[in-house]
Image (spheres, rainbow, N blue to C red):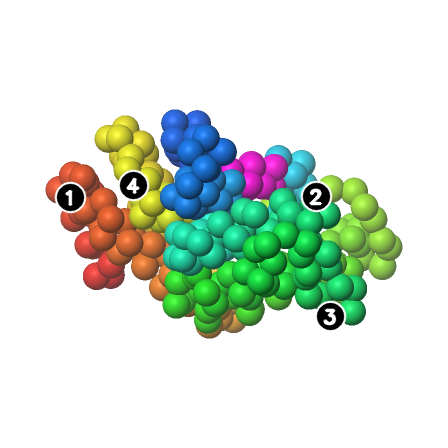
Amino acid sequence: MGRIVSRLKFRQKLQTRAIQRVIECYGICEGMILRNLPGYVNDAFYFGLSKACRSLMASRLLYDKGFHEDSLVLIRTAYEAYLFAASSLRLDAQEVTDLLVRRPIMLSLGLLRKEKRTGRTDASGPRAAQFKPHIRPSFLVKEGGHPLDLAIHPRLYRHLCEHSHPNMVTSGHYRDTEAPTEFACTPSKSEYPRVLFLSIYVGSLLLAEVAAFEDLDPPETAAVTRQLIGAVVDIRAYLDSLPKDESDGLMSLMWRRSRQALRDLLKYKGAELSRRERDCIHRILSG
């Protein structure tokens, strides 16, 4: 398992570096400048991508210090930001502008009023009827997610929420490893590779969305391709290292979703990939 952990750590760092590079090269606030629908879609996507990338980077910092459950809390944040970014590419541009961009701003400015009992929103402005109640992750995954995300989301999100809220299921993270009957808040001295796996899984989905959305230059295309292929290979290696009783249906669905990310890469960037890269992807998909 030590070799797998080292491999996952290496991949996670390279993956977030590739996403960060895309943000630094292409993340311009076009909506703020152009004030049009495509610009607002661009801003929603890069906001989600930036938030997800930062959360994954922060998650890694906590993981390296031994705060594994706290690291999972940030992976939940990154996953929610992925859903936000993915929805911005699949919802209608007007709906993205109203639901994901303008609505939160209007709420913060007091132009939208939220009912405490019903959760509904009322507005004093002329566009009030276009705004819907609070946008939940379940809405984003249903309206803007990939079909496999619909099957994965309930179980994956429940698992991440168990570590985000007080839940006795996770109390083992707060017991002394040397004295299991005593609580402790000190960092763990052992590894928890599932955290790294989940981080790489979310990162691979983000890379696939980047490939679908942005017209990348060759250096960034190469970086995204390398890290997406590497992530899927390392995800398979991690799953193969698990005992049979830990490799459940959710893991199988996540593996299928990772393979779909490679298919999406071929769909949107296939003509820009080298023959070697295409052959590598085809070998993974046929395996």
The residue where tag 3 is placed is: 118
Q: Nearer the viewer, residue 247 or 57?
A: 57
Provide the residue span drawn in magenta.
49-59
Between disc 3 and disc 4, whose residue precedes? 3
Callout 2 secondary element? loop
Between disc 3 and disc 1, whose residue precedes? 3
* Magenta stretch encompasses residue 158: no
Comparing labels 3 and 4, the label whose residue is closer to the camera: 3
| Rendered-image quadrant of the C terminus | bottom left
Around disc 2, counting alpha carbons within 10 Å, would you say few (fewer than 14), some (14 to 19), or many (20 or more)? few
The residue where tag 2 is placed is: 109
Is residue 90 rendered to the left or right of residue 66?
left
Between disc 4 and disc 1, whose residue precedes? 4
Comparing labels 3 and 2, the label whose residue is closer to the camera: 2
Callout 3 secondary element? loop
Q: Are marks 3 and 2 in contact (CB under 8 Å)?
A: no
Above or below, 121 against 4 in this view is below
For this orientation, the residue located farthest to the right is 182
Query: Label 3 vs label 4: CA separation?
Result: 45 Å
Q: Nearer the viewer, residue 215 or 257?
A: 215
**Residue 285 place in picture, x, y as percent:** 24, 59
Q: Residue 271 bears which disc, if any?
A: 1
Query: Label 4 vs label 1: CA separation?
Result: 12 Å
Residue at x 31%, y 48% (from the top left corner): 212
The residue type indicated by label 4 comes to Thr
The residue type indicated by label 3 comes to Thr
Callout 1 secondary element? helix
Mainly helix, strand or loop, the magenta region?
helix
The residue type indicated by label 2 comes to Leu
Query: Label 2 vs label 1: CA separation?
Result: 46 Å
The residue where tag 4 is placed is: 225
